[in-house]
Image (cartoon, rainbow, N blue to C red):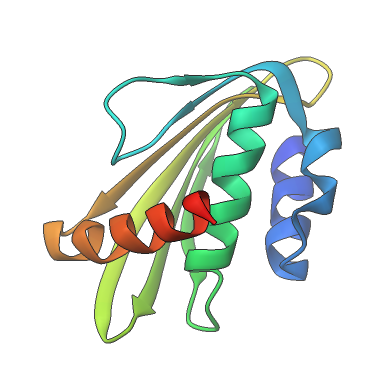
Amino acid sequence: MAAAIDHWHALMDARDPSGLDDLIADDCVFQSPAVHTPQLGKEITIKYLTAAQKVLGVPSFCYVEEWIGASSAVLEFQLDLDGIQVNGVDIIHWNEADKITSFRVMIRPVKGLQAVMPAMAAVLAG
């Protein structure tokens, strides 16, 4: 029913971002909890998602709940990042071709976001 989400889960389970090119739409919009403006386009979305997979792809990462509609889903995740509990959601929309068109990440608590931000910045800068 939600091929885009099945594809996303397969990529997360494999910890392999190489399949993102097939999953992300050219006009995708990525919204980060740490960047105030939407990031526009496939290339920047893949860059952020690849970095997030490196930072958040620790063994404790798991999706704990998901709510799936006709063309959107909310996936709740949790992980332990260097002793800090991080909880968040990925809000994902896709088109009729099962390509992701919008990816928004929200993270809580503030201490969790404060742990994620410098780790993401370091991976994105590298």
Q: Residue at x 79, y 26 (%)?
A: 98
Question: Is residue 1 visible in this depiction of the protein?
Answer: no
What count of labels does the image hold? 0
Q: Give coordinates of residue 29: x percent, y percent.
A: 53, 20
Q: Is residue 107 above or below residue 81?
A: above
Question: Is residue 109 visible in this depiction of the protein?
Answer: yes
Q: Give coordinates of residue 86: x percent, y percent.
A: 29, 67
Q: Give coordinates of residue 23: x percent, y percent.
A: 79, 35
Between 65 and 84, the one lying in front of the other is 84
Q: Residue at x 16, y 59 (%)?
A: 109
Q: Quadrant of the N terminus?
A: top right
| Left or right: where 31 falls relative to 53 | left
- Farthest-out residue, left: 110
- Farthest-out residue, front: 126
Between 76 and 100, the one lying in front of the other is 100
Q: Quadrant of the C terminus?
A: bottom right
Q: Residue at x 27, y 26 (%)?
A: 36
| Left or right: where 73 falls relative to 86 | right
Q: Residue at x 78, y 68 (%)?
A: 14
Q: Give coordinates of residue 103: x percent, y percent.
A: 52, 32
Q: Is residue 72 above or below residue 21?
A: above
Residue 78, picture quadrant: bottom left
